[in-house]
Amino acid sequence: MVERDRLIAALEDATHASSIHNSQPWRFRLVEGGVAVHLDPTVTPRTVDPVGRWALASIGAVVANLELALTSRTGRAVVTEITLGDSIPEAADLAGGAAYGEGPLAVITLGEAAETTTAMTAARLHGAIKERHTTRGPLLGGPPTEEEWAELQAAVAWAPGIQATPASEPLVRSLLSLTARAEDARQEDEDYLEEIQNWVENEAPSGTGIPRGAIGAPDAEGHVPIRDFTQTPMGSSGDGEAVFFEDPPALLVLHAASDTPVDQLRAGYAMQRAMLEATALGLGIGVLGQALEEPDSRAAVDGAAEESFGAPVVVHQILRLGHPAGTITYAATPRRPVTDLILD
């Protein structure tokens, strides 16, 4: 029997996973031999996530953290069962993951003592969990090396069916253009701007949201279209100066052969493993997901990737990776107390 305090410590570690707008939509139930992971769609943003893609990715990310934390803190291997079905709900509202709020989406069970290699990998990445941050600034110290790309691809391979491919320069240009176009369209959507304002202005649920110190600055030359968290329905609330970003940025495309809910969850898992590996390697990590949020722009991204890769793919996430030119100081992002996240 694993002591409850070790399980609680592992859950606390897990909550440092990436989630859409730092909404932290996970809930946990302690079950015989492990932990069940649930989605709470009542705390997720809706406009930015019209089909629940980012909600499921957030659950995948917390599962990745929880596996590593449980092994690191208990010395035991884990077995994870994805209990989310492959079928896409038809009648239910998908926005913000509302269709996936019934029952656990994954159950992680503790097994026998972990093998040495597994334990060492878990310990290394577990150490990166609280050091991982999203970089919304330039990465001017150079792209990942070939060896680092290989490590990142190996990290993604932990998720069945998800692959990672570094984007060629023509594909980088296409993805940047599509992302910029999607970002511009979002800036004309008052519902989206109001939602963004709420998550930045601390009107989000307590212990969640994006602090102003973490929203970053725009690219002075417009090469890298990071998500603009300064826009509101009344105009820009930003007061910082633009800075120069790397050109071209190094992009890693996470893709699969299909786009089921399970794929979306596993893509979040793969993203988190890649982020932790990048953190351990000393890389900065940005996310360029705006063009994946609406059907038309997502289809255009898939088409650009298909042309580059020579085979049909579904793009699940685009990561911007690179070495910082110096030390990056990150604003602390809030976290909800783990005791508030455990279901009876």
Image (cartoon, rainbow, N blue to C red):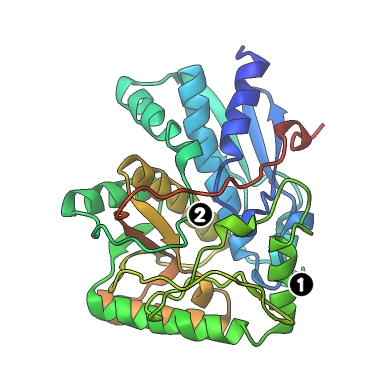
Looking at the rendered structure, the kind of residue marked 2 is Gly
Looking at the rendered structure, the kind of residue marked 1 is Ala
Q: Quadrant of residue 135?
A: bottom left
| Residue 239 on image: x %, y % | 59, 71
> Disc 1 and disc 2: Cα gap in Å?
24 Å
Q: Quadrant of residue 37?
A: top right
| Residue 177 on image: x %, y % | 40, 84
Which of these two is toward me, 114 or 197?
A: 197
Disc 2 marks which residue? Answer: 268
86 up-or-down from 75: above or below: below
| Residue 283 on image: x %, y % | 33, 50
> Are the two marked residues, 1 and 2, in contact with CB atoms closer than 8 angstroms?
no
Res 57 seen here = yes
Which label sits on residue 158?
none
Which of these two is toward me, 120 or 135?
A: 135
Secondary structure at numbered mark 2: helix
Image quarter (top left, top right, bottom left or bottom right) of the N terminus: top right
Image quarter (top left, top right, bottom left or bottom right) of the C terminus: top right
* Front tag of 1 and 2: 2
Disc 1 marks which residue? Answer: 91
210 up-or-down from 82: above or below: below
Q: Quadrant of residue 178?
A: bottom left
Residue 193 in the figure: left or right of residue 167 = right
Residue 179 in the figure: left or right of residue 230 = left
Q: Earlier in the sequence, mark 1 or mark 2?
A: 1
Residue drawn 70% across the image and 73% down it: 47
- Near mark 1 (Cα within 10 A), the count class, few <14, some 14-19 or many ≥20, is few
Residue drawn 24% across the image and 76% down it: 169
Residue projecting furthest to the right: 344
- Near mark 2 (Cα within 10 A), the count class, few <14, some 14-19 or many ≥20, is many
